[in-house]
Amino acid sequence: MAAGDIHTFREPHNPKKAIVLEGADDAIQIDAWGTDRQTASDTVGTITAWVMPRNSTGTFTIIAAGDAGSDEFIDFSIVAGLLHAELSVSGTTSFDVESDAVHVKEHVWTHVALVQDGQKPRLFANGKLVASTDDVSTNLSHWFADVSGIDVANIGYLEANSTLTQDYLGAVGEIRHWNKALTDEEVLKDYEGSKQSSAVDALQISNWDWDGLTDKWAGANDGTVVSAAVLNPVHTSMSSQLKTAATVVADDISIAESGGVVTAVVVKAA
């Protein structure tokens, strides 16, 4: 980019509380969540999240639990817009499941879900089950009970075998976890923000809504900021777009709103 370059963005005003990550070893550390679920020997479960990556080409972990010193992990991620779930035990992949089509786009809030029903993982986007392929199906029924070495967990990257990989670039909104395989209808309710039954609520483990770092549900697995991760109470598609423009104080920036749509014009200073 050079002085005088003009960038124009027009996006809906769609604010959500989020954690914003810069793709450089920053995350929200939730080690207790991973160890608790392994100790509880969970065999089924559901993880839902709102996500807004800043590009459509990267491999970004949404949430993962792993063994810091061994190649064992459970990972829910985005791979070039595809939804991806993978579980490894002692260096052997139990399952590697990926959506057949792109469901997550850059600068757009997308609701995603991973459901393990004790038979195989299922992937959802915006409340609907999506077609997926079992690229590895050694043991599709594996879950936390089968990954005995879990001692770390993070929102924003995969930590396992003494390495940090798949750093997330963009925003992650509210995340929920149940010790239950939600039905298709219950996943849709989470997407719509509808009230779940008391029986479903009773099996919710964690809820990070980013009104601070506190786990608001039964798990009480509060997060810890790692490196450059920051909370944003009103992250929007425009917030994401302006990040790509690498705006600085000297830039000339004009922003206007009309009918729920925000338009920004950025004239680069240098």
Image (cartoon, grey):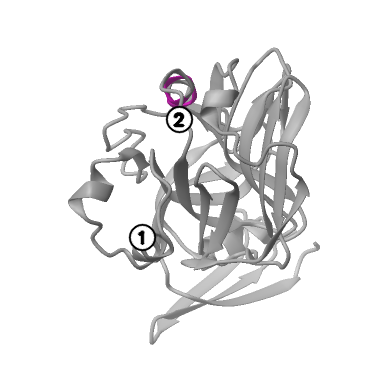
Task: Judge by depth and name the residue closer to the eye, 241 or 125.
Answer: 125
Q: Say which residue appears at 77% left-offset and 57% top-offset.
A: 57
- Residue 105 location (% of width, % of height): 64, 66
Residues drawn in magenta:
33-37
Tag 2: residue type? Answer: Asp
Magenta span has 109? no
- Image quarter in which the C terminus is found: bottom right
- Image quarter in which the N terminus is found: bottom right
Quick one: which residue is furthest to the top in this view?
69
Q: Say which residue appears at 52% left-offset and 41% top-offset.
A: 118
Task: Judge by depth and name the residue closer to the eye, 157 or 116.
Answer: 116
**Mark sitting on residue 186:** 1
Task: Judge by depth and name the residue closer to the eye, 41 or 7.
Answer: 41
Where is residue 240, by image quadrant? Answer: bottom right
Callout count? 2
Q: Is residue 42 above or below residue 77?
A: above
Magenta span has 35? yes
- Considering the whole magenta stretch, tell me its main secondary structure: helix
